[in-house]
Amino acid sequence: MSNSHDETAPPANGAPTLTTRQGHPVPDNQSNRTVGDRGPTVLENYHFLEKISHFDRERIPERVVHARGAGAHGFFEAYGSIGGDPIAPLTRAKLFQTKGAQTPLFVRFSSVIHGGHSPETLRDPRGFSVKFYTEDGNWDLVGNNLQVFFIRDAMKFPDVVHAFKPDPVTNRQDSTRIFDFVHLSPSAMHMITWLFSPWGIPASYREMRGSGVHAYKWVNANGKAVLVKYHWIPKQAQRNLTQAQAEAIQGKNFNHATQDLFDAIARGDHPEWELQVQVMEDGEHPELDFDPLDATKIWPPEQFPLRPVGRMVLDRNPTNYFAEVEQVAFGTGVMVDGMDFSDDKLLQGRTFSYSDTQRYRVGPNYLQLPINRPRNEVATNQRDGQMTYNVDGVEAGGNPHVNYEPTARGGPHEAKPAGVPHTPHVSGNVVRQPISRLNDYGQAGDRYRAFETWERVELIANLVDQLGPCRRDIQDRMIEHFTRCDRDYGRRVAEGLGLPVPVLTAAAAD
């Protein structure tokens, strides 16, 4: 498989040099600085922190992404095992340990790119985020309906969203902008193949699969960690729409998914999903032709089977949309004991960005709101800020005069460790590089071949429709990318555009 790095455009005549807002030229806008090419990411990524912080503040009060959403309350019920095997050897997270134990939760489903009143029939990834109110505090499992993403480094997050957002001059979403970005970003080929197939328009939230996308870690009582990926499998079966079906629905009801979810719960038809996980030993896994931390890849289920650990049921609608669905705030860094981060560079960037966005959008005390507040007692030394209405720790019996630690005057004290800490070993040069195993085309081709015939027909038709207005050089490059994924894939897009099929060398086409 091709291992070339993501391609960048040659500078246009008279085009300005990219700089930071401080005027510093940016020689590398593709990769964060990490320890080795796999990570973890280092904190002194000043260019990234400035870039993502500004991006987080582009919209107020509406979310920059995932503005259009619907939500519901429910519970998670643990099976007390993983596929029938003991779960304690893999994780000490309490919510998974006891069969039948229930954890209250809130779910928000959403579309990504357009505003709060946009149609729910648009071709777009769907957010699938779950807030668990556990006995050890909140756990946020922030995911999408599709199992992969467009990029693998958080440095590119504002860029991919900007490319898919409406043009800043015309205020129209424009396929020439989308494919201008994509034709120079081979990492997006897997996600594009999913998105422009019927999977890009789920029939409803109830019939939609969910995925955590990233590799996370589970940690057991001895501090040993494994990599884990999360999947929500709907008990209602999975159903997607063709472009024609979506347009027919949109002509009559642009709220169809929100209406379907609310009405189903109101009539007692409570939707249910099973939480299934894939587990992999922690490590680089050189035997694989992809990096297991790469968010543009799936873990093949035939090698890493999906194993059930519990189920989720949604059984109560919100009583106020704004107070609950709009103000609920998720973050990929919100985990409980027994869970940890992997070195996935996109995950680590999102972990800063998501909570930073909520502090800006909702306010510094967004975690005091009932929908976001943990169900267990909160005792911190964080004080004041806009819209403060209670004092952390005091209601738990702490001394109101003490807002520091250590103290012998009744302030909060450190907790005892729940188990042996996980202490991964990290060494390497701090570099600004993409990962070494890119393989941008292999899984995109696998996905194309796995689609049913009608799904491939729909995929090609949607791509041809959106690539039609693009410049010839973008069309040619995209056809080459599709051909590298699968010869038939590239041929059919080329024929649909009335363009010649590229002749690639055997090595390039592999």
Image (cartoon, rainbow, N blue to C red):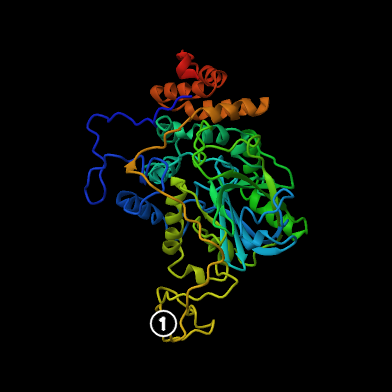
Secondary structure found at label 1: loop
Q: Is residue 347 left or right of residue 218?
A: left
Give the x, y percent position of residue 64.
45, 53
Of all residues, the one furthest to the right in this rendering is 268
Q: Nearer the viewer, residue 266 or 89?
A: 89
Residue at the location (37% across, 42% down)?
A: 36
Examine the image and state in which quarter residue 95 appears: bottom right
Task: Specify the amino acid type for callout 1.
Answer: Thr
Give the x, y percent position of residue 415.
51, 72
Relative vertical location of residue 47 with respect to residue 3 in this rendering, above or below? below
Q: Nearer the viewer, residue 207 or 213?
A: 213
Within-10-Å neighbours for mark 1: few <14, some 14–19, many 20+: few
Relative vertical location of residue 387 with respect to residue 123 in this rendering, above or below? below
Give the x, y percent position of residue 251.
63, 42
Does residue 159 appear in the picture of this structure? yes
Relative vertical location of residue 315 with respect to residue 122 in this rendering, above or below? below
Q: Is residue 488 left or right of residue 16?
A: right
Q: Is residue 195 left or right of residue 249?
A: left
Residue at the location (78% across, 59% down)?
A: 268
Q: Which residue is mark 1?
A: 407
Does residue 274 appear in the picture of this structure? no
Give the x, y percent position of residue 391.
47, 80
